[in-house]
Image (cartoon, helix red, strand yellow):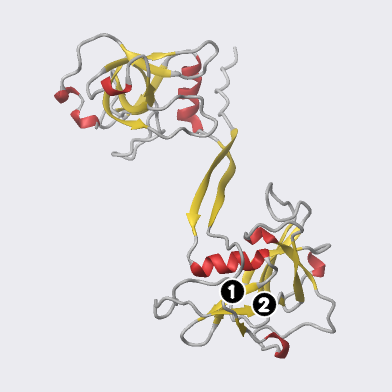
Amino acid sequence: MTAASPPQVLRAPLVVEFPFTRSLGPVQSAFLTGLRERVVLGVRTGDGRVMVPPVEYDPVTAEEIRELVEVAPAGTVTTWAWNGDPRPQQPLATPFAWVLVRLDGADTAILHALDAPGPDAVRTGMRVRIRWAADRTGAITDIACFEPEEEDGDAEVGGARASGAATPHDGAFADPVTGIVAEARLDYTYSPGRAQTAYINALAERRTVGERCPSCHKVYVPPRGACPTCGVATTDRVEVGPAGTVTTYCIVNIKARNLDIEVPYVYAHIALDGADLALHGRIGGIPYDQVRMGLRVEPVWTDGGRYPDHYRPTGEPDADYDAYKELI
């Protein structure tokens, strides 16, 4: 007789991404518009330093900075790291070096990619120049990357270069860039661990399973593997629900990308019967303006679904506030 093998802990790729839209002030607008026109701008601080990329406020005095200057599109590598396995949407698809480059005329370094055949071809002090993108829109990606500059020797890091003095610039361009959309993205492999693996597997069977703390006896759903209050491991599994109580909720009025749900709709915290922690879920089967605290709800599953699609009213009387006030 052989012992049963433990269930396999789940692993899956996970991508978290959202577009971040921001408006640009006069300094950042001039910097990004300048890149579109193959011009690199920085700002001169109160103590005379030139900062590239430019900032809007002096890092020493916190005073607003508006004095724009133009620097050279070539400079010196101050430090670097080799990237042998580029990720999606990085500047280059082939292995490259991340470099900090102090452009001629600047006192700070800019971070970007250096197109080099291998790590042996990269060194601190090497001279590099900007390779401009063919199609430029007013973004940092208008610098496609840096590439080695054909020079007669490396520069001394920290030393001045006679041909690289910063020159004043008024920052005026036709059709200036006034806003950008930054695509924030986090791409990684997620493992839910022992407790949440059991929880997810139970959901596939249309059951909701939490874990009870052996010390305070609270039941956590979803389980965390340990009690956040007592700090002890939770191993006693408890099936809860399926019905529960809306403890609090919000009305969503902005349609999410790639989510086929018409607005407005309601997302709520739901305390399942027998649980001491509320989970969140969408409320359906009722007009959004009729959802309320204390509403009794039950899960609705779709064919083949591994988790409830939404929760709907059970038709029971609302729960008394004292029954769920500690779970809000």
Q: Residue at x 59, y 74 (%)?
A: 52
Within 10 angstroms of label 2, few (less than 14), some, or many (20 or more) residues? many
Query: Which circle marks residue 320 in the picture?
Result: none
User: Dividing the picture into quarters, in which one does residue 267 lie?
Assistant: top left
Query: Which circle marks residue 52 in the picture?
Result: 1
Dot placed on the residue nearer the N-terminal end, 2 or 1: 1
x and y percent of residue 50 in the render?
56, 81
Give yes or no for contact between labels 2 and 1 (Cβ–Cβ under 8 Å): yes
Query: Would you place residue 37 above or below residue 95 in this image?
Result: below
x and y percent of residue 74 in the render?
73, 76
Q: Residue furthest front?
A: 174
x and y percent of residue 212 in the render?
33, 26
The amino acid type of the residue labelled 1 equals Val
Q: Residue at x 57, y 48 (%)?
A: 183
User: Dividing the picture into quarters, in which one does residue 314 lie?
Assistant: top left
Mark 2–mark 1 distance (CA, rounded to whole Å): 8 Å
Query: Which circle marks residue 103 in the picture?
Result: 2
State whether residue 204 appears in this view: yes
The amino acid type of the residue labelled 2 equals Leu
